[in-house]
Amino acid sequence: MHLYLRTHVAASPAQVSAGFTRELFLALAPPFPPFRLLRFDGCQRGDEVHIELGAGPLRRRWTSLITDDGIMPDGTHYFVDKGQVLPVPLRYWQHRHLMQPAPGGGCYIVEDIEYRTASSLLDRLLYPVMWAQFAWRRPIYRRWFGLVGRR
């Protein structure tokens, strides 16, 4: 299943890329499910991010590896995280983070996500939950990186 969200912010792609820190990662965490950051190396190739979701006996680990990062010829900064250890029911996870130059200034922060479970029906049922988890980030990005038209 493919999920794509785009948020326009005032900061440049380079500023946003540099701003993907441990502090931002923590700020982006939605209120549910319970979340604990166990490891955050950064957003460059070879870095890892380990989180724990849920509480008590429902706790599940999620480990992602940054498999690629760089700058495209058009000035888009990017990094890609790929799930290594995923919580049930996920079987595949790839999240491309793009910071694309926006006409007139600022940039678009793009969440380009591909995920799969064991069932295409379950993939579709999870879509609204996945969308909400990442739509949650939009106002946070705007607070951190500025509203377009305001600096």
Image (cartoon, grey):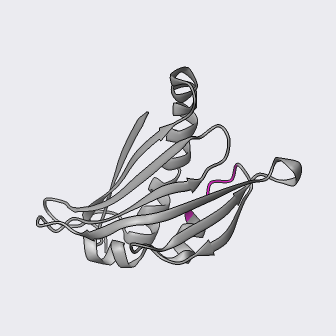
Q: In this view, does 97 lie above or below 120?
A: below
Can residue 12 be seen here? The reply is: no
Which residue does the image show at 12% across and 64% down from the upper left? Answer: 74
Left or right: residue 95 compared with residue 9: right
Please state the horizontal and vertical placement of residue 91, each as a whole percent of the image: 56, 41
Please state the horizontal and vertical placement of residue 92, each as a whole percent of the image: 51, 43
Q: Residue furthest right?
A: 56
Magenta segment's dominant SS is loop
Q: Is residue 76 above or below residue 88?
A: below
Quadrant for the C terminus, please: bottom left
Can residue 84 be seen here? The reply is: yes
Magenta stretch encompasses residue 39? no
Query: Of residues 102 and 78, which is closer to you in this image?
Result: 78
Query: Of residues 110 and 147, which is closer to you in this image?
Result: 110
Left or right: residue 121 compared with residue 141: right
Which residue does the image show at 14% across and 62% down from the upper left? Answer: 104
Q: In this view, does 88 lie above or below 99?
A: above
Please state the horizontal and vertical placement of residue 123, each as a whole percent of the image: 53, 29
Quadrant for the N terminus, please: top left
Please state the horizontal and vertical placement of residue 8, each as a whole percent of the image: 30, 57
Which residue does the image show at 38% across and 70% down from the upper left? Answer: 145
Which residue does the image show at 44% across and 60% down from the upper left? Answer: 81
| The residue stretch that appears in magenta | 28-32
Magenta stretch encompasses residue 29? yes
